[in-house]
Amino acid sequence: MTWYKKKKEKQYTSVENALIKMSQFCAYQERTQQEVRQKLLDEYILNEDEREFIIVRLIEENFLNEERFAKVFAGSKFRVKKWGRRKILQALKMKGISEYCIRAGMKEIEEEDYVATLMRLLDKKMAQSKEKDTYKLKQVLARYAINKGYEQDLVWEQIKQLLDDAHN
């Protein structure tokens, strides 16, 4: 038994059959055009025009909608994984999402919720930290939040506020 996943053999199929398969693929969860193109390329023997025809049909039938994908992606990465805007933005760009759709997705994150989530993350991290040196604690907190994708200026501002509140 091999520990790696064997590459699937490409199949000959009709455009109609591939369209049905891709409709199911997109109905399962939100997808990007890039993901659908890659799956079509990896699994089926279709020419470029046929692949693009399938993409267009999926868009027309609303199986594929990158603005909707960006909204769901940004909202869920923020709410579930507590990612910051920078990390979400970078991930959306890597998925080939347009600037317009990225902006629409980023609007899903309310400023008040964003700052409150950052404060909860910092507070939790501070409680877990055994660091007694304030300077080193600030570094630990900042590194953690910045790696989660939060903006450096906002992180430092919130750390200052958190430590001021802790000392009062």
Image (cartoon, grey):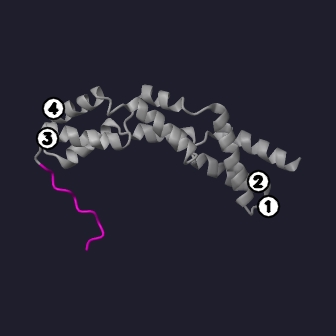
| Residue drawn at x 87%, y 49% as measured from the top left | 167
Disc 4 target residue: 49
User: Which contiguous range is marked in magenta?
Assistant: 1-11
Report how far apart the C-alphas of labels 3 and 4 lie in the structure.
8 Å
User: Which quadrant of the figure has residue 125?
Assistant: bottom right
Q: Position of residue 12 (x, y in %)?
A: 10, 47
Disc 3 target residue: 46
Q: Position of residue 145 (x, y in %)?
A: 63, 48
| Residue drawn at x 45%, y 42% as measured from the top left | 91
Q: Total marks drawn?
A: 4
Mark 4: amino acid: Asp
Classify the position of the N terminus by image quarter: bottom left
Circles 3 and 1, Cβ within 8 Å, touching? The answer is: no
**Left or right of 87, for residue 143:** right
Residue 135 is marked as: 2
Circles 4 and 1, Cβ within 8 Å, touching? The answer is: no
7 is within the stretch colored magenta: yes
Circles 2 and 4, Cβ within 8 Å, touching? The answer is: no
Q: Residues within 10 Å of mark 1 (few under 14, many from 20)?
A: few
